[in-house]
Image (spheres, coloured by chain):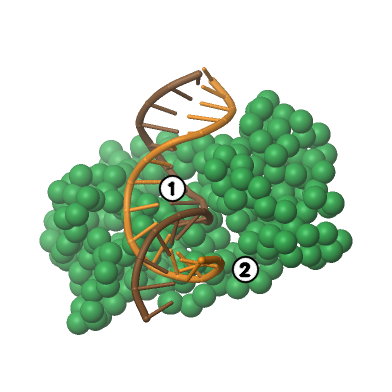
Chain colours: A green, B orange, C brown
Amino acid sequence: MPELPEVETIARGLAERVVGDVILSVWLGSKPEPFKSPAPELAAVLESRRIARVGRVGKHIVFDLEPDRRSAPRKAKKTKKTKKAKDRGGQAETFGGVCGAQWIVHLGMTGRLTIEAPDREVEKHTHAILTLASGRELRFVDPRRFGRLSVARGFLAPGKEPLEVELDAFVRLFRLRKTPIKSALLNQKLLSGVGNIYADESLFRSSIRPRRRASSLSSKELEQLWRAVREVLEEAIALGGSSVSDYVNADGAEGFFQLQHRVYGRRGEPCLVCQTPIRRVVIAGRSSHYCPHCQK
DNA sequence: ACTATGTCCTGCGAGC
DNA sequence: TGCTCGCAGGACATAG
């Protein structure tokens, strides 16, 4: 289940492999479609585009696209657009200056983007195939179909980036919420990128029980949580994410952060700090794991 | 404006 | 061996 660290790992792997490549053609599956944008619009935006950059925003993979130089006349409208770019901070306009189209991929639970040779058998639950000028194919496979494909411009996460948010902004997000802190951490409109695994791990690290009302946390606890979220995510990125279920990165390699899980998926097993059995409860319909002794 | 809950979707493993 | 059933959960819709 790709959360921020897995998506970051996947995006980095894809960037190494497809930046500079050109999308020649697009095939989209016809079943009930996991496409947030209508299929014809998706195909129209993707075809004949060069992949200028691949990155991550929240749990989304973002492909920055620019027109293929070979098919589009390279008459840059430099004079007008450069000014605008600067007004907006410039970042979104440094590529694809003419259009700035983006392909947004959300992997949901079981989504995968794979790079394959065209003669490679098409896996069951393949919903999209992009033929690349390099002769390879970029395929989107998602058995459970919680993933979504869409196109956008200037895509922004609905909430704050967990690795960038300042302490005071973090505190403001949670201070007044009456919902359990676990639910608040999962709310992508507050923080974008934290999912079930890293919410549980962050709460363990900051010694906070998942059911605590967010508004009941002291300033000190919020600061501990702020720090824990960042640490957990950064450590997980360093290890290539957590391989639970069938997650693998763009190279098909597994991540190793699951070996560092202290509570997630450890129901009944002894706490690594105090030996108390880890408890599992359901909060907001999600399994939540905590140590009843270490977390208050 | 918040909060809580149900729904989608398929594969897998436990249990009989 | 083969079956059923519960579970996994991100995002969104809906209701309160």
- Front residue of A82/A114: it is A114
Secondary structure state at the residue bearing disc 1: helix
Instruction: Give the amino acid type for the residue marked by disc 2 in the picture.
Output: Gln
Question: Would you name the residue on which mark 2 appears?
Answer: A258
Residue A263, position as x, y percentages in the image: 70, 59
> In what quadrant of the picture does the C terminus of chain A appear?
top right
Give residue A81's position: percent from left, percent from top.
Answer: 30, 41
Task: Confirm whether circles 2 and 1 share one chain.
Answer: yes
Q: Answer yes or no: is residue A255 visible.
A: yes
Q: Position of residue A61 (x, y in %)?
A: 41, 56
Which residue reaches farthest right? Answer: A274
In the drawing, what numbered circle is on residue A25?
none
Q: Nearer the viewer, mark 2 or mark 1?
A: 2
Secondary structure, mark 2, is: helix
Q: CA distance from mark 2 to mark 1?
A: 34 Å
Q: Quadrant of residue A252?
A: bottom left
Residue at figure coordinates x 27%, y 49% from the top left:
A35
Q: Chain of mark 1?
A: A
Question: What residue is drawn where x is 78% and y is 60%?
Answer: A277
Task: Pick whichever, A80 or C15, lies toward us.
Answer: C15
Residue A171, above or below A146: above
Local crowd at mark 2 within 10 Å, few (<14), some, or many (≥20)? Answer: some
Q: Is residue C4 above or below residue A158?
A: below
* Chain of the residue displaying label 2: A
Task: Tell which circle, 2 or 1, labels the residue nearer the N-terminal end.
Answer: 1
Q: Which residue is mark 1?
A: A91
Q: Is residue B15 left or right of residue A52?
A: right
- Residue at 13%, 61% (x, y): give it: A71
Q: Nearer the viewer, residue A74 or A241?
A: A241
Q: Amino acid at mark 1?
A: Gln
Q: Is residue A152 left or right of residue B6?
A: left
Quadrant of residue A156 within the rendered picture: top left
